[in-house]
Amino acid sequence: MAQEAKSYKKQFADVQKQIDVLLDRIIEADNATVIKAYEKKIDALENEKIILQENQAKPAPSTRDFSASLELSLNFLSKPWKLWESGNISLRRTVLKLVFTDHLSYCRETGARTPQLSMPFKALAGVSGVLGSNGG
């Protein structure tokens, strides 16, 4: 995203430099036909500047549509262990960040503490009754 912004700024500066060069040439030109050609080129460059400004203001298009993103999210929510079993450390960190709201706590005397689940997993636990049941 930042790279796109730099690219738009550079293109904008290049177009402005071309306009400035053409304006200097108009001042030095004597032929009316040449002046008209320069003015036509300046108009085209001004339009290009406007397009660049509009493109810079637009948010970047999403690479996935909503249904694909929803399917990916639901697939993760239904089987987070699949990512965990991949063995990839960055995926495992991602799973931990998405499943738990905070770092996992451990007490030397009593062992692992009850983790705080993120909202989607709390909702799923409530629906399935995993955490809400008393075992009886």
Image (cartoon, rainbow, N blue to C red):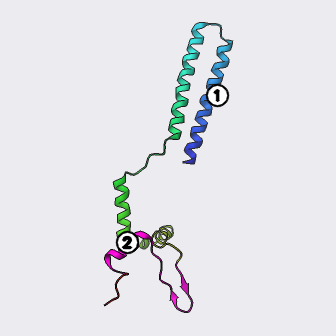
Is residue 59 in sight in this rendering? Answer: yes
Under mark 1, the amino acid is Lys
Under mark 2, the amino acid is Ala
User: Could you tell me which residue is drawn at 52 percent across and 74 percent down?
Assistant: 102
Give the x, y percent position of residue 108.
57, 90
Pointer 1: what residue?
17
Give the x, y percent position of residue 39.
57, 16
User: Could you tell me which residue is drawn at 45 percent across and 71 percent down?
Assistant: 118
Q: Is residue 23 above or below residue 131?
A: above
User: Could you tell me which residue is drawn at 62 percent across and 33 percent down?
Assistant: 13
- Point out which mark residue 123 bears: 2
Give the crowd class for mark 2: few <14, some 14-19, many >=20 residues within 10 Å: few
Compute the Cα span from label 1 to label 2: 57 Å
Instruction: Compare marks 1 and 2 and give the one earlier in the sequence.
Output: 1
Name the residue at the top extreme. 31
Q: Nearer the viewer, residue 122 or 24?
A: 122
**Is residue 114 a member of the stretch shown in magenta?**
yes
Q: Is residue 119 above or below residue 6?
A: below
Q: Nearer the viewer, residue 121 or 21?
A: 121
What's the magenta region? 104-130
Give the x, y percent position of residue 10.
61, 37
Give the x, y percent position of residue 112.
50, 85
Quadrant location of the C terminus in the rendered image: bottom left
